[in-house]
Amino acid sequence: MSNTIYYTVWAVCHCAAYIVGLSYPHLQTPETGMLWVGLVVTSLSAAGCYYLASTSDPGYLPIATPTALAPSDETIAAAPHLYCSTCNIYPRPLRSKHCRTCDRCVERFDHHCPMIANCVGKKNAPYFWGFTVHQCLNLLCAFGFVLADLRTDPYPQWRRPIAYDIPREYVVYALSLVLFNFFCLAFGFAFSVTYWLVQNVTTNERINQARYSYFHQGESRFDKGPWHNVLVYFNLVSEDTDPLSLENSLQHHQP
């Protein structure tokens, strides 16, 4: 449902923007050519990233077969955080978590996003980042058209329609204020996602870092520098999430 609502709103807003923009000759000049290119490219890229983020596998861990034997009670008692009774997974990799909404364990779980109606995890996190950044750039291009419109007056005083009672500047100012607020919201969201991916910290870990043994004084053992963290986020290099290979991984780690 959330996917349908987003695509409907996206299609209506963008179609209206293109119709209005194409109906104004003063917005079809060489100066606004790059704005048109940027608007079209970022519109398509944001929609594409949204589609991939909402439909891709976020990194579901395979569910054990019904006949698979569960670990012994002693094993579970020694490390309860490594066992998912719903998915019958043991040992569960560090940084993974069982999503109650999807009812699956997700590798490098970040959060369940209602806007995309899907989890954000190891496999679809790059698409989610792409959506936030391209949506921000798209709003920036739209704001550029508003600024370009303020520089010209398509209706000289003697040619203004009778129904043109409200000064054009007021309408443009109101539209620019709305776009600016949306841009600030999108920029804050994109900046937050980018900042934490550079730190190699997920949303779940930020909220519950006191539960995880691989956090020491607020620093994660998975943070190995910005460049390496970016490569990990985009799945260009792998990281060791085997709980048995990390020191003290069995302490203070809860699902």
Image (tube, rainbow, N blue to C red):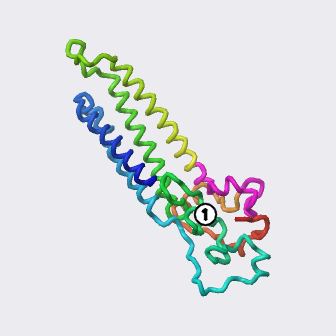
Q: Residues within 10 Å of mark 1 (few under 14, many from 20)?
A: few
SS for dot 1: loop
Residue nearer the viewer, 155 or 118: 118
Query: x%, y% of residue 52?
Result: 42, 60
Query: Which range is magenta?
Result: 195-219
Q: Residue furthest front?
A: 1
- Which residue is the site of mark 1? 100
Q: Residue at x 33, y 20 (%)?
A: 168
From the top left corner, tell me how far across and down residue 171 is, in percent: 37, 23
In which quadrant of the rendered image does the C terminus lie?
bottom right
Q: Residue furthest top?
A: 158
Q: Is residue 213 magenta?
A: yes
Q: Is residue 140 left or right of residue 248?
A: left
Tag 1: amino acid: Arg
In this view, which residue lies farthest toward the left? 159
Q: Is residue 42 visible?
A: no
Q: Quadrant of residue 200?
A: bottom right
State the quadrant of the N terminus. bottom left
User: Quadrant of residue 253 in the image?
Assistant: bottom right
In this rendering, the count of numbered labels is 1
- Residue drawn at x 28%, y 34% as measured from the top left: 21
Q: Answer with left or right where residue 74 lies relative to residue 100.
A: right
Q: Is residue 71 visible?
A: yes
